[in-house]
Amino acid sequence: MLPDADRSRLLEAATLAAAQAYAPYSHFRVGAAVLTEQGTVHAGCNVENASYGLTICAERNALFQMVASAPRPLAVRALLVYTPTLTPTTPCGACRQVLLEFGSRSGVDVLCVCDGLDEIAATLDQLVPLSFGPRSLD
């Protein structure tokens, strides 16, 4: 389970990122923040495109921010997804697969929060059972 201090840091980063989302088509703003094993936080927002296939989700944006600036080795300990909605939203399948690439060996906590009262707390293993990732190639 994610300690309160880490949850607060991630929530603040994800909330600020959601405010920066570029969502002129869906109007669905998403912010995400990842916490690395080294304790650094990297945030991202969704960026839509008129050619929908070129849209990037907040979760992958946060992970790519991590890749661009975090010290190696890259290992995600937790992901928090924030949406300014009444119900929480979990990462899409593509984001789950990319998260598998950088998940720590000890597992990844995934927390999905919103402006409503509900939240979803799971592990990456729960979100992607029987997954194919880097460990499949060992």
Image (cartoon, grey):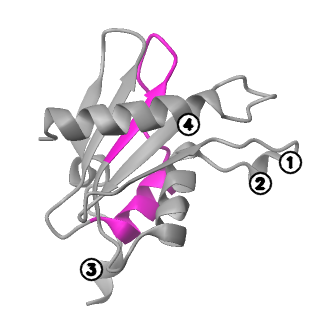
Point out residue 14 in the picture as x, y percentages from the top left corner: 46, 36
Q: Residue at x 19, y 36 (%)?
A: 5
- Asked whether the viewer can see residue 30, the reply is no
Q: Which residue is mark 3?
A: 135
Q: Quadrant of residue 64?
A: bottom right
Could you tell me the amino acid type at mark 4?
Ala
Could you tell me the amino acid type at mark 3?
Arg
**Disc 2: CA contacts within 10 A as few (<14), some (14-19) or many (>=20):** few
Point out residue 80 in the picture as x, y percentages from the top left corner: 36, 39
**Mark 4, secondary structure of its residue:** helix
Whichever of labels 1 and 4 marks the residue nearer the N terminus, that label is 4
Q: CA distance from mark 4 to mark 2?
A: 19 Å
Whichever of labels 4 and 3 marks the residue nearer the N terminus, that label is 4
Point out residue 95 in the picture as x, y percentages from the top left corner: 49, 53
Q: Which residue is mark 1?
A: 51
Q: CA distance from mark 2 to mark 3?
A: 28 Å
Could you tell me the amino acid type at mark 2?
Leu
Q: Which residues are magenta?
A: 79-103
- The residue closer to the viewer here, 7 or 49, is 7
Q: Which residue is mark 4?
A: 17
Task: From the viewer's perspective, tell me whether residue 1 is left or right of residue 47.
Answer: left
**Mark 3, secondary structure of its residue:** helix
Q: Residue at x 35, y 71 (%)?
A: 132
* Residue 92 counted in the magenta span: yes
Task: From the viewer's perspective, tell me whether residue 102 is left or right of residue 2.
Answer: right
Q: CA distance from mark 1 to mark 2?
A: 6 Å
**Mark 1, secondary structure of its residue:** loop
Point out residue 13 in the picture as x, y percentages from the top left corner: 44, 38
